[in-house]
Image (cartoon, rainbow, N blue to C red):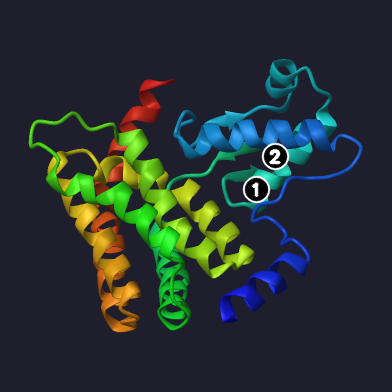
Amino acid sequence: MARSRRSSESSSSSPPVAVGSAPVGVSGQLASQILRTLRERILNWHYPPGRHLGEQVLCDEFSASRIPVREALRALAEQGLVDQVPNQGCYVKQPDVEGIHQLYDFRLALELFVVERLALVGLAPEFVQRTRENWEPLLSIRADAPVDGAELVRADEAFHLGFARELRNAYIEEALQDINERLRFVRQVVITTPHRVQATAGEHLAVLDALVLRNAEAARKALRLNINAARNKVEIALAQALTKSHKHR
């Protein structure tokens, strides 16, 4: 009954404002397209830190006037992805190790709240079954099995977002989606071997098992172990991402 009431309340409420929402206005649609493209390039390190994002170059690339380009760049600055230098323009922001760890703090705080609430209200049986089917086979992955890092990163993100969706809190889901995009490069470094895939599967199932038992303390412990496995690789991931991005120059 509690889950039904919460679902009804959630569906009748106004949709949340998306984290890093796109600009609106006469040129809003084109500005949104430019924003999405530039954001993806920055977060996937196709643009190295310090790269100048010249307005005229972007206008030519997107066949746009300066208005939507400026709106997109302003939105990127508000999201903390570019620096706006007076009389010089916009530059891709330099990586900030401390800022990345702060993102992990934020992510951990959100996800701990999610599992604590789910330990109280329980999980839908269909969600539990689907999650087990996704992750239990990976406990026995062969030591020489090829690892598709991109696919596993998507699966890992879906696992964590799945709990937020079970809680039916759209605001938390939006925030976690934004954090996922910003931290994806760390996950791509961490999930690279069958051993780590096995460990990740075990950590995920430990969180799930604890929530099935309504054991909030065990769920928090398993979640911390899983998230910190990636967090501890921040410096390595940052170095690899920087190397990769400068090769694209």
Residue at the farthest left position:
143
Label 1 vs label 2: CA separation?
6 Å
Q: Relative to the observer, which residue lies in front, 65 or 226? A: 226
Hey, which quadrant is residue 102 in on the image?
A: bottom left
In percent of width and height, residue 35 lies at 68, 37
Q: How busy is the neighbourhood of tag 2: few (under 14 within 10 Å), some, or many (20 plus)? A: many
Looking at the rendered structure, the kind of residue marked 2 is Leu
The answer to whether one can see residue 39 in this image is yes
In percent of width and height, residue 58 lies at 69, 23
Q: Is residue 167 above or below residue 136?
A: below
Q: For the N terminus, which image quadrant? A: bottom right
User: Which residue is pictured at 21% across the width and 45% down the height?
Assistant: 137
The secondary structure type at the circle numbered 1 is helix
Q: Relative to the observer, which residue lies in front, 167 or 212? A: 212
Q: For the C terminus, which image quadrant? A: top left
Q: Relative to the observer, which residue lies in front, 237 or 126? A: 126
Q: Is residue 32 above or below residue 120?
A: above
Q: Circle 1 sits on which residue?
A: 77
In percent of width and height, residue 17 lies at 72, 59
The secondary structure type at the circle numbered 2 is helix
How many numbered circles are shown?
2
User: Residue 73 has which mark?
Assistant: 2
In percent of width and height, residue 150 lies at 36, 34
User: Which residue is pictured at 39% across the width and 29% down the height?
Assistant: 245
Q: Disc 1, disc 2: CB below 8 Å?
A: yes
User: Residue 40 has which mark?
Assistant: none
Name the side, left or right, on which 50 lies relative to 148.
Answer: right
Q: How busy is the neighbourhood of tag 1: few (under 14 within 10 Å), some, or many (20 plus)? A: some
Q: Is residue 220 above or below residue 16?
A: below
The answer to whether one can see residue 97 in this image is no
Looking at the rendered structure, the kind of residue marked 1 is Ala
